[in-house]
Image: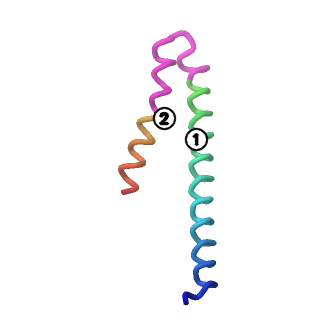
Amino acid sequence: MPDWSRIGRLLDFCAAYYTTQIVRCAAFSFLLLGLVMLARKMLFSRRTFLRGLLWPSFLLISQKRQVTDR
């Protein structure tokens, strides 16, 4: 019979690790969102195409992050 306290500690560790990763991603997303919105207002206020071009930066960064995590 497995030691139930060890399984419980493993589940606690996994839950804490997963929560930490989610919080890091959320904080990074809010920071990036703020930068994009600031750039849209300040730098690209009259250039509609460039304003729209900022949003794919989320995809590029997320794909780069997935490649480096492996």
Where residue 41 sits in the image (x, y, percent)? 61, 20
Is 47 magenta? The answer is: yes
Few, some or many C-alpha atoms within 10 Å of disc 2 (few <14, some 14-19, many ≥20)? few
Does residue 67 appear to the left or right of 40 in the view shown? left
Tag 2 residue: 58
Mark 2 belongs to which amino acid?
A: Phe
Secondary structure under tag 1 reads helix
Q: Quadrant of residue 28?
A: top right
3D distance between C-alphas at marks 2 and 1:
8 Å
Secondary structure under tag 2 reads helix
Where does the magenta region start and end?
40-57
Question: Which quadrant of the rendered structure holds the N terminus?
Answer: bottom right
Q: Main secondary structure of the magenta part?
A: helix
Asked whether disc 2 touches disc 1, contact meaning CB atoms under 8 Å apart, the reply is yes
Tag 1 residue: 29
Q: Compared to 49, does 40 lie above or below?
A: below
Where residue 65 sits in the image (x, y, percent)? 42, 48
Residue at 59 percent of width and 84 percent of height: 6
Where residue 50 sits in the image (x, y, percent)? 46, 17
Which label number is shown at residue 45?
none
Q: Nearer the viewer, residue 40 or 3?
A: 3
Q: Nearer the viewer, residue 2 or 56?
A: 2
Does residue 53 appear to the left or right of 39 in the view shown? left
Residue at 36 percent of width and 57 percent of height: 70
Instruction: State the count of labels.
Output: 2
Few, some or many C-alpha atoms within 10 Å of disc 1 (few <14, some 14-19, many ≥20)? some
Does residue 52 appear to the left or right of 63 in the view shown? right
Mark 1 belongs to which amino acid?
A: Ser
Is 2 magenta? The answer is: no
